[in-house]
């Protein structure tokens, strides 16, 4: 199984990139391709920019990359209770190519933050909206207090209850 994994942020030090990479690699017999949103940077979407640029190659490449896997796993960083600007922008461009951005792929949605909320607001928004964009959401998982529950040196989740929950979720793929 080929899993397309991405952190919905442009941060080079993203804890969500760490989380999605870790979670995707828990799926047995899988090949994980980790996307970097920085490879798909585009001008801010607007109808005027779309009229000027059409469908940019980077937007097409993003859409095609999502379609190239058997499953999609995304971990969402939360900026002011919502999506990061980097993710929202490339998503908006891709949705103009085809509203079925997720192309009926099975998906697992994740989120984390340094605080106790675990980026729950953005995860709820993503989980609720993905089916409208042809996402077959198999489940979601939030990791609260990232630095208390994930050992960066060992690259592993340290909270046994959360690890059991995450393992159960990735088994759904």
Image (cartoon, rainbow, N blue to C red):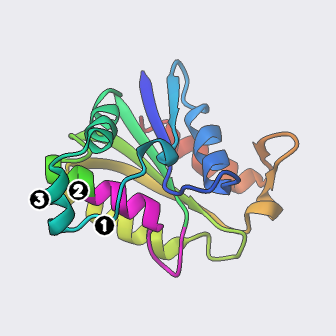
**On the rendered image, what quadrant is the C terminus found in?**
top left
How far apart are labels 1 and 2 at the CA level?
7 Å
Marks counted in the figure total 3
Q: Give the residue at the far front of this rendering.
A: 52
- Outermost residue to the right: 153
Occupied quadrant, residue 72: top left
> In front: 45, or 168?
45
Residue 2 seen by the camera: yes
Given residues 169 and 119, the one toward you in this image is 119
Where is 137 relative to 124, above or below?
above
Graded by Cα atoms within 10 Å as few (under 14), some (14 to 19) or many (20 or more), the crowding at tag 3 reads few
The residue that mark 1 highlights is: 128
Q: Are marks 1 and 2 in contact (CB under 8 Å)?
A: yes
In the image, farthest residue toward the top: 29
* Whether residue 166 is situated above or below residue 66 in the rendered picture: below
Residue at horizontal 70 percent and vertical 55 percent from the top: 161
At 68% from the left edge and 55% from the top edge, which residue is drawn?
15
Q: Which mark is residue 131?
A: 2
Between 173 and 98, the residue placed more toward the observer is: 98
Residue assigned mark 3: 51
């Amino acid at each position: 199984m080929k899993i397309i994994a991405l952190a919905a942020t442009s941060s080079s030090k993203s804890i969500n990139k760490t989380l999605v990479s870790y979670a995707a690699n828990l799926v047995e017999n899988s090949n994980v391709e980790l996307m970097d949103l920085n490879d798909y940077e585009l001008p801010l979407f607007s109808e005027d920019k779309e009229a000027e640029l059409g469908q940019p190659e980077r937007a097409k490449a993003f859409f095609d990359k999502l379609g190239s896997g058997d499953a999609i796993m995304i971990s969402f960083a939360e900026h002011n209770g919502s999506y990061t600007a980097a993710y929202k922008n490339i998503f908006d461009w891709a949705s103009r190519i085809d509203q079925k951005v997720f192309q009926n792929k099975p998906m697992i949605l994740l989120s984390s933050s340094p605080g106790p909320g675990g980026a729950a607001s953005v995860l709820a928004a993503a989980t609720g909206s993905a089916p409208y964009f042809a996402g077959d959401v198999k489940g979601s998982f939030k990791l609260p207090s990232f630095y208390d529950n994930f050992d960066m040196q060992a690259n592993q989740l340290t909270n046994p209850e959360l690890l059991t929950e995450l393992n159960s979720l990735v088994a759904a793929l």
